[in-house]
Amino acid sequence: MADVAKKSSKTALLAGLAWFVAFETAAFYGLRYLTSGLGESNQNQAENTIVSNWLKTMVFFVAHLALIITAVLVLSNRLPRHYRGQIMGWFYLALVMSFVLIIPLFG
């Protein structure tokens, strides 16, 4: 039973949430700058804008996924064992945020 890890405290969860929000904010603005030249800002055009906006979406998704996986790999090696139980929860939330962040990306 010595291998069973204790649950993280509320303070550790709040610190994890703060770091998660900071990471997602920095990732969004960094990827927004990276993809700023792609896509069409005016969606109501006579021409077809699906291809260029699809490219912007896919570049954003792949780059965001690469950032998330890199963060998980780094954190799983750097964090003490007691806090590693939080990593996968934040990872799954970041995957969901990939879809949510598309809305303000084109907004």
Image (cartoon, rainbow, N blue to C red):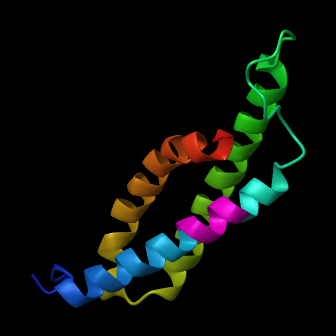
Quadrant of the drawing holding the N terminus? bottom left
Name which quarter of the figure residue 88 lies in: bottom left
Name which quarter of the figure residue 53 lies in: top right
- In the image, the segment drawn in magenta is 24-29
Left-right relation of 29 to 5:
right
* Residue drawn at 53 percent across, 81 percent down: 77
72 lies above or below 96: below
90 lies above or below 47: below
Please tell me whether the stretch drawn in magenta is mainly helix, strand or loop: helix
Nearest the eye: 87 or 60: 60
Quadrant of the drawing holding the C terminus? top right
Q: How many marks?
A: 0
Left-right relation of 20 to 107:
left
* Residue drawn at 59 percent across, 41 percent down: 102
Nearest the eye: 49 or 59: 49
71 lies above or below 7: above
* Residue drawn at 69 percent across, 63 percent down: 29
**Can see residue 60?**
yes
**Can see residue 9?**
no
Residue 19: give x, y in percent of width and height: 46, 79
Residue 78: give x, y in percent of width and height: 52, 87
Name which quarter of the figure residue 42 lies in: top right
Left-right relation of 38 to 95:
right
Residue 90: give x, y in percent of width and height: 39, 64
* Residue drawn at 73 percent across, 57 percent down: 31
Residue 28: give x, y in percent of width and height: 64, 60
| The stretch drawn in magenta includes residue 5 | no
Residue found farthest to the left: 1
107 lies above or below 3: above
